[in-house]
Amino acid sequence: MSRGGKRDGAGRKLGAPNKATQERQRRVAATGITPLDYMLKVMRNPEASDERRDEMAKAAAPYVHPKLASLQHTGRGGGPIQTVDLARMTEEQLNALESLFGPLATGSGDDEGDQSGEDEESR
């Protein structure tokens, strides 16, 4: 039985507030309006200038809406994503794909029954 080192599930969960943070949040909330409450109040005040309301909205946004992570999609080994132009395949190749992928190859999407193909439509 080994001891020490990182163990799965051990320790405080990421983002969990410690006792000091929790106590500080309780004191701020108990003394009245929090900074976020103030920013939201100014942002919603029709009497405030548009510029000030915009600044408060920008300042409050990170506390209300999570920042989205950007993802970059890549192909195998970090290379480019490989695509296949089905419009340039022979009937034999398309039949082979249909036999491999079954219902997925026949398509049950928006263009069901449309035999024209995308290329012909955009010409």
Image (tube, rainbow, N blue to C red):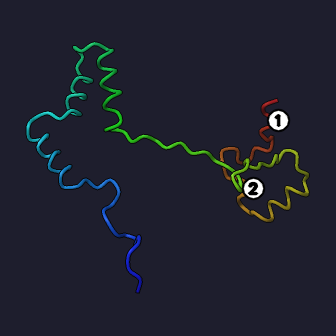
What is the three-letter code of the residue carrying label 2?
A: Thr
Residue 99, by quadrant, is bottom right
- The quadrant in which the C terminus is found is top right
Instruction: Locate residue 8, reporting x and y percent.
Output: 41, 71
Q: Is residue 68 left or right of residue 17?
A: right
Residue 4, by quadrant, is bottom left
Instruction: Locate residue 114, reporting x and y percent.
Output: 75, 44
Q: CA distance from mark 2 to mark 1?
A: 18 Å
Residue at 32% over, 26% down: 57
Query: Residue at label 2?
Result: 106
Instruction: Locate residue 2, reporting x and y percent.
Output: 41, 83
Instruction: Locate residue 80, reporting x and y percent.
Output: 73, 47
At numbered mark 2, what does the secondary structure look like: helix, strand or loop? Answer: helix
Residue at 30% over, 32% down: 60
Q: Nearer the viewer, residue 85 or 81?
A: 81
Check residue 120 in the rendering and tell me which mark sits there, or answer none: 1
Count of all numbered marks drawn on residues in the image: 2
* Labels 2 and 1 touching (C-beta < 8 A): no
Q: Is residue 107 left or right of residue 67?
A: right
What is the three-letter code of the residue carrying label 1?
A: Glu
Q: Nearer the viewer, residue 115 or 30?
A: 30
At numbered mark 1, what does the secondary structure look like: helix, strand or loop? Answer: helix
Q: Nearer the viewer, residue 100 or 112?
A: 100
- The quadrant in which the N terminus is found is bottom left
| Above or below for 107 versus 45 | below
Q: Is residue 56 left or right of residue 85?
A: left
Residue at the left extreme? 31
